[in-house]
């Protein structure tokens, strides 16, 4: 049986990295959104979708 994910049992260094990523993900999404509006490429649109998914996952505490 698989263990359930519990963010409180993570090592301290991983909690620090997770906290830093959750702070920087929204500015990266905004920058990438502006970039997609100005220079739309397939890679940029997919990268923006991944960043938005990660931001929502951090907000809902799925990651």
Image (spheres, helix red, strand yellow):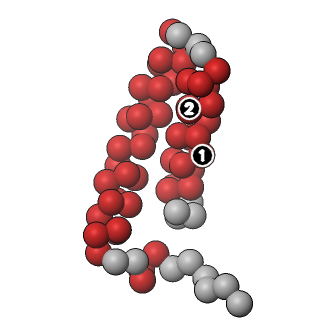
User: Where residue 35 sits: x, y (%)?
Assistant: 48, 17
Q: Nearer the viewer, residue 59 or 9?
A: 9
Label 1: element kind: helix
Q: Is residue 55 left or right of residue 28?
A: right
User: In this figure, which residue is indicated by the disc labeled 1?
Assistant: 53
Seen in the picture, residue 18 relative to 21 is either above or below; the reply is below
Label 2: element kind: helix
Seen in the picture, residue 34 relative to 15 is either above or below; the reply is above
User: In this figure, which residue is indicated by the disc labeled 2?
Assistant: 48
What is the residue that sits farthest to the bottom in this orientation? 1
Q: Is residue 4 left or right of residue 31?
A: right
| Image-quadrant location for residue 52 | top right
The residue under the point 42% across, 83% down is: 9
Q: Nearer the viewer, residue 44 or 27?
A: 44
User: Where residue 1 sits: x, y (%)?
Assistant: 71, 90
Seen in the picture, residue 54 relative to 42 is either above or below; the reply is below
């Amino acid at each position: 049986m698989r263990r359930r994910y519990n963010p409180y049992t993570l090592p301290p260094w991983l909690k620090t990295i997770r906290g830093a990523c959750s702070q920087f993900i929204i500015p990266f999404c905004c920058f990438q959104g502006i970039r997609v509006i100005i220079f739309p490429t397939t890679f940029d649109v997919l990268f923006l979708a991944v960043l938005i998914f990660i931001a929502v996952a951090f907000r809902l505490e799925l990651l």
